[in-house]
């Protein structure tokens, strides 16, 4: 043989002879503040904590937004396609026409996440919920085990999703399959109905209920500091399911209701953490852990009582941001970065990390320089949209510590502007949070300057700057709408 040493090297170090694996973990409706790596002191997630300690945490990761009340649908399509909000492809038989963007659908489908990794020689596996996703692309995974699991038992809880991954990894080990793998490990929780395991419900002082509870356990999580009994103005989506028909909540925002729902949410998240731990342990036992990139994120955040809201159809930080944790070859443990990333950056990032050409159809950016510690941010400006209800809806823009949210809904009935300095007011506290009846419930003591600053003349220049920046991003991203005080589209 011409190169005997090379053969010896590849046999001795087989993991160096193939591309890295990817384990992509995606939860449904999970905000960063539910994890201790983002400051939570109640919800226990030891396995996700270890993942964060072994890798990097991004503090400013976002989903771009939605033109549908089912926020997960465009969000998951952005993940799968690398496309921005207003450039999404047709996603399946049930998608709405107004959700399609300016695209060539077939070209994007052929360059979606599973298609790209199939062509690169990966074995692609998927388990996740059914529906509200890019169904055409989902079918391209070589192995698909999809099922909506929003209960607590082994057959209809997060355990089912975990077991599909474990079974897949066991099968690979038995077959001594040396192909690199891409695993899309999706959960159906902590999306409502947040039916938790009995042992975890007891731990977090919660009950699985269909109607709002009238009492609360002393073990239930405390009210969030940004809790309100109702949002200060109509959020612009009348009859929205997430705000009026969630089992166990409905229109109630009482202390008992919100604390019970938080307990249920935490029970679901700890159950997810258990499954993540089992899968990571399996990777270690079969010798694949060191050669695997592991990512943990969610399709979007959610309010669960904050600002008087329950759903994800808003642009406050609790619903616009997502958790984003990554570990693997070359990623230094125990690190953090701002990131300034979108979920649509996932596809180009995966390609860049493992040495696959990034498809031309992808509009996101590779986060590889951020994950490897060479940069703090991927971009300087972040844009968010929600118009699943009345149009043009809500828009947000963030640059540095400053954030603007605009509302133009209900045929001009609601026209509001909010300006926050997130360094000084990270929870986006409003004047309503300063009311005695609210303070009595939350126990929070907000500072005088922790309010919406849009009406304060001291910040008039900053407000103008952020308004101009928002319009600029709307034009750049082909936003099809304009607000009442913006130049209209010709």
Image: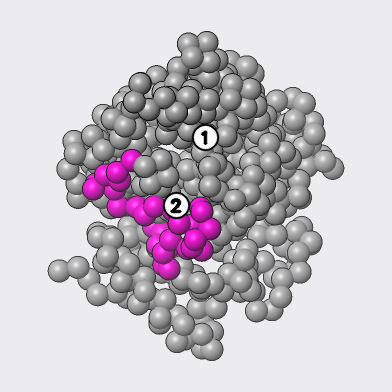
Residue 69 visible in rendering: no
Please name the residue shown 49% across and 47% down the image. Answer: 300
Mark drawn on residue 127: none
* Crowd tier of the residue under label 2, counting other residues whose Cα lies within 10 Å: few below 14, some 14–19, many 20 or above: many
Q: Which residues are magenta?
A: 356-385
Which element type, helix, strand or loop, lies under badge 1?
strand
In the rendered image, the residue lying farthest to the left is: 490
Inter-mark Cα distance, 2 to 1 = 15 Å
Mark drawn on residue 368: 2
Residue 171: percent from the left, percent from the top? 51, 13
Q: Does residue 366 belong to the magenta stretch?
A: yes
**Among numbered discs 2 and 1, the one appearing first in the sequence:** 1
Q: Residue 155 is drawn in which quadrant?
A: top right
Looking at the figure, which quarter contains the N terminus? top left
Please name the residue shown 41% across and 40% down the image. Answer: 354
In the rendered image, the residue lying farthest to the front is: 2
Q: Nearer the viewer, residue 238 or 125?
A: 125
Q: Does residue 310 belong to the magenta stretch?
A: no
Of helix, strand and loop, which mostly describes the magenta segment? loop
Tag 1 residue: 292
């Amino acid at each position: 043989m011409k190169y005997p040493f090379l053969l010896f090297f590849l046999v001795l170090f087989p993991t160096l002879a193939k591309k890295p694996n990817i384990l992509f973990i995606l939860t449904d409706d999970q905000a960063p503040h539910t994890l201790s790596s983002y400051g939570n002191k109640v919800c226990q997630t030891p396995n996700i904590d270890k993942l964060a300690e072994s890798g990097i945490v991004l503090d400013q990761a976002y989903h771009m937004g939605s033109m549908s009340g089912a926020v997960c649908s465009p969000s998951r399509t952005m993940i799968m396609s690398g496309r921005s909000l207003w450039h999404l492809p047709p996603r399946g038989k049930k998608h709405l026409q107004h959700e399609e963007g300016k695209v060539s659908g077939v070209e994007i489908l052929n360059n979606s996440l599973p298609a790209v990794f199939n062509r690169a020689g990966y074995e692609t596996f998927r388990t996740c919920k059914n529906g509200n996703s890019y169904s055409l692309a989902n079918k391209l995974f070589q192995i698909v085990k999809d099922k909506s699991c929003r209960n607590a038992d082994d057959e209809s809880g997060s355990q089912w999703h975990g077991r599909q991954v474990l079974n897949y990894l066991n099968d690979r080990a038995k077959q001594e399959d040396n192909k690199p793998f891409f695993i899309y490990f999706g959960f159906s929780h902590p999306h409502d109905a947040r039916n938790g395991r009995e042992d975890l419900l007891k731990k977090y002082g919660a009950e699985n209920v269909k109607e709002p509870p009238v009492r609360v356990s002393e073990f239930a999580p405390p009210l969030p500091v940004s809790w309100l009994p109702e949002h200060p103005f109509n959020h612009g989506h009348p009859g929205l399911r997430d705000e009026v028909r969630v089992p166990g909540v409905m229109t109630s925002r009482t202390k008992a209701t919100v604390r019970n729902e938080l307990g249920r949410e935490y029970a679901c998240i700890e159950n997810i953490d258990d499954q993540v731990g089992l899968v990571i342990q399996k990777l270690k036992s079969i010798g694949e852990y060191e050669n695997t990139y592991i990512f943990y994120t969610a399709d979007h955040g959610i309010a669960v009582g904050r600002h008087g809201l329950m759903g994800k159809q808003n642009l406050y930080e609790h619903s616009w941001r997502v958790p984003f944790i990554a570990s693997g070859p070359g990623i230094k443990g125990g690190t953090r970065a701002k990131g300034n990333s979108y979920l649509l950056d996932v596809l180009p990032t995966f390609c860049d990390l493992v040495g696959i050409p990034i498809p031309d159809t992808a509009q996101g950016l590779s986060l590889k320089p951020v994950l490897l510690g060479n940069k703090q941010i991927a971009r300087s400006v972040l844009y968010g949209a929600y118009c699943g209800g009345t149009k043009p809806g809500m828009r947000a823009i963030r640059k540095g510590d400053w954030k603007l949210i605009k509302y133009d809904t209900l045929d001009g009935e609601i026209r509001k502007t909010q300006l926050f300095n997130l360094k000084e007011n990270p929870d986006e506290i409003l004047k309503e949070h300063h009311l005695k009846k609210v303070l009595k419930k939350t126990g929070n003591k907000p500072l005088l300057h922790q309010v919406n600053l849009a009406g304060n003349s001291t910040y008039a220049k900053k407000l103008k700057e952020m308004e101009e920046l928002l319009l600029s991003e709307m034009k750049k991203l082909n936003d099809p709408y304009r607000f009442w005080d913006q130049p209209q589209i010709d």
